[in-house]
Amino acid sequence: MASGTSGDSGGGNPTSNWNFYVPFGEASASSPPPNPPLHHQQQHKTEEHAEATLPEARDTIKATPKGSVETDTYKTSFREKWTTFWSLSVPYFRENGEGRCLFAGLIVLMLLDSGVRVGFSYLARDFWSALGDKDIDAFYRIMKQFLMALLFLAPVNVFYRFQRQRLAIKWRKWMTERILRLYFYNSHQVYYHLERRGTVEKDEDVGIVDNPDQRIAEDVRAFTRYSLTLFLTIAVSLIDLVAFSTILYLIEPKLFLSIIGFATLGTIVTVLLGNQLVRLNFERLQKEADFRFSLVRLRENAESIAFFRGEKTEGREISDRFDRVVNNAYSIIGTMRDLEFFTASYNYLTWILPVVVIAPQYMAGNVELGVVQQAAAAFGHVLDDLSLIINQFESLSEFSASIGRLHQFVRAVQNADPDLDDSAPLLGYPPGYDGHGSGASSVGKDGIFNNANPDTRTSPLSPQESIEKSIQLQELPPSANTMVASTFALAIKNLRLDTPHGQRTLIHSLNLELKWGERLLIIGSSGIGKSSLLRAIAGLWSSGTGTIERANTVDVYFLPQKPYCPLGTLRDQLLYPISTGHSNKLDEDDNDIENWQATKTAVDDQHLLSILKDVDLGDLASRIGQGNELEGLGTTLDWSSTLSLGEQQRLAFARVLVHQPKMVIVDEATSAMDVGAEERMYSLIQSMTVISVGHRPTLLGFHTKRLHLKKTPGKDYCECTVDDILSNPNSVNNEEVNLFFR
C-alpha cells in the first residue's frame, strides 16, 4: 500500500474510493495535490504513520563511550534481518495466550475492514454511473446503501485501531518485563557485568552495547508498535492485491499487466537510490544520543564546571556534537531529495496512467463512467500494494536500524548470564530456568553455596577451564546460627586477582582469615587494587584464581565512597534495597528478596528517626518536613543534590543500623567526614565484622587487623602483608601510625 498502509494498515476511510482517483503516495510537498472532494483516507493513514514512526535518540540519557565500536547491524542481509525480527517477535505469541487471542481478533477485524473496502469500490462504481446517466432514483438508492454501510464501517474501523494499539501495549509490557528480568532482576547482576565489559573490551559477538536505557525504553516500544504496523501493512497489501487485482483484470487485462511492470521498475530504482538511508538512520541514533548525553552531563556536573570556568570548553564540545547531528540530518535529507526526484515523477504518472488506458473504451461507449472510476481506484490500490517498499523505504530503514540495536542488546544480556547457553532463544528461557538465576548456585558440602560467576559466560575456555581460571566465591548459608556454624566470616585461600580479561595481575597468593567480630583495614597506595579486592569479595569480579568464602550476600552490606541515593522518600533511603510501597510482579517469585525481607524485623518510623539521630542527622526529617518529622520521612527529593557528600555518607551508615548485617564492607565511606564524625560512625558498627579500605591513619584505631598491599619490586602484582594491630583498637600510638605509612 501507499502511505496509507504504513500506519493504518488498511484501516482508513474507504469513502476515499468515491474520488475519481485516490492519489498515490503520502500527501507531501513532493507529491501532487489530492483530488478535491474526499481525500480522508490518505490524511488518516498519514497521521497513523506518524504515531508509528521510530523515536529519535533525543530521549536517550547516555551516549556511546569513546572508542566504542557498534556492530554494523545495518550491513546485515535481508535474510538475517528477517531472522532477527522473527526471533524477537515469536516468544511473546508462543508463551502468551492472551496475546494470541488478541492477534486472532485483530486478523478478523483486518479481514472485515478489507472486505468493506472492496464493497465500497462497487458502491463507488454505481454512484458514478448513476451520475453519468443522470439517474436520480439510482443515485438516492446508492446513497442510502452508503449510509447503511457506514453503520457497519464505523465500529469495524474503531475496534480495528483499538485492538492494534491494545496488542502493541501488552506486547511492549511483556517484552519490557522479560528484558528487565534478564537484564538486572537475577542473582548474576548482569546489568553490572554488561556495563563493565562495555567499558573495557568489545564483545566479538555483539559489540559494545551503548545506551541500554534507550534500548529498553524506546527501542522496545518502537519495535512492538511498528512490528504490528508492518505485519498488518503486508497482510492488508496481500489481501488488497488479490481483491483489487481481480477487479482490475476483469475490467482491463492490459491495465493489470502494465501495473506489474510499472511497480517492479519503481521498486528496483527506489532500493538502489535509497539504500544508504539505513546506514544514515543507524548513525543518527548514536549522534543524537551523544548530543543529549553531553547536555545531561553538563547539568549533572554544573558546579564543577563552574568552579573550573569550563563553560566555553563544554560549549565547544556540545556544539561539536550538535554539528554531527546536523551534518547527519543534511545527509539524510540530501539522500531523500535524490530519492524523491524519482518518487515525485512516479507519483504524477500514477494519476494519469489508468485513465489513459481505460478512456478509449469509455469514449467508445463500451464502459460506463463508474467503471472508469472503479478501474482508477483499483489501479491505485494494486499499485500501492506492489509499491510497498517505495512508500515505506524511509520507515523501513529506521525500523531496520532499531531491530539491529534491540537484537544486539538482548543477545548481549543473555550472553552475560551463565545460566543461558548459546542455544537459548532470544527472550526465551531454557527448561528449568526461572529468570532469577536459579541455576547460578548449588549447595555444596557443609551447606556452603558455590556461586558461578557471569564472567565465565563469555570465556573462550571450556566450562571446566573457565571454572579453574576464575575465582570461586562460596557463601555461608543465611541463618541466625551462621556465626556458630562457621568460625570465620571471611576466608581467602590462594587468591590471585587479575584485572578484567586478565590483562594484569593485581594480587598474588593472598591468604586471609577473618573471624566473626574482627575488623580488617586494607591499606595501600592509590590504584594498587584495594577496591578491586572488595569487588572480588562482593562477587562482582572473578578474574583470577583461588577461593573466597564469606558470609551470605543477605548478611553483607556495602558502603561505597560515593553513596547511592535511590529515587524515593527519606524512608526509602533508610530501608534500601528493600522496597516500600511498590508492588512489582517481577519480584513475586524472587525467593532471595522474599527471604531477605522476611528475616528483617519490621522497623517503625520512630526507630528510623532514632537512627537518624545516631548518625548526626537528627534534624533532617524535621527540616525537610517543615517541622513534621513523619512528613519528612515520607518526602521525596533528589537526595544526591539535597544532601552534602558527608550527609550522604552518614545516611549510608544509618542504613547499616537499620539492616543490622553481620558483615559490613566500607570502601572509604568516611572520606567526606571529619575525624570526630568518622569515629562516631565506626563506633556504631563496632559489634559487626568490618572490612574497610582507607587512607587515614586514624582508621587504625577502629580495626583489629591490617592488610597492607604494596608494590613488589620487579613484579606487576603487589605484596600482601597481614598482621594484627598492636594496641587496643580504641587507642592508636605513634608506632602504629608509622606502620600505616610503611
Image: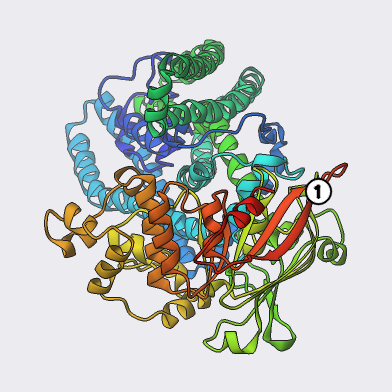
Image coords of residue 474 (percent x, y):
70, 74
Image coords of residue 292 (percent x, y):
45, 29
**As displayed, is residue 232 above or below residue 433?**
above
- Disc 1 packing (10 Å; few <14; some 14–19; many ≥20): many
Q: Is residue 379 visible?
A: no
**As displayed, is residue 295 above or below residue 440?**
above
Q: Is residue 664 visible?
A: yes
Is 525 on the left-hand or right-hand side of 214? right
Identity of the residue drawn at 27% across and 27% down? 38
Which color scheme is applied?
rainbow
Identity of the residue drawn at 37% across and 23% down? 306
The local secondary structure at tag 1 comes to: loop
Q: Which of the two residues, 631 or 657, is positioned nearer the viewer here?
A: 657
Q: Which of the two residues, 489 or 72, is positioned nearer the viewer here?
A: 489
- Please, which residue is most extreme toward the left here? 627
Image coords of residue 154 (percent x, y):
26, 48
Indicate the quadrant where residue 132 lies: top left
Is 145 on the left-hand or right-hand side of 97? left
Q: Which of the two residues, 731 or 371, is positioned nearer the viewer here?
A: 731
Instruction: Report the residue marked by disc 1.
Output: 717
Q: Amino acid at mark 1?
A: Tyr
Is 87 on the left-hand or right-hand side of 312? right
* Number of callouts: 1
Image coords of residue 716 (percent x, y):
83, 44
Q: Which of the two residues, 536 or 588, is positioned nearer the viewer here?
A: 536
Identity of the residue drawn at 45% across and 54% down? 172
**As displayed, is residue 476 above or below residue 492?**
below
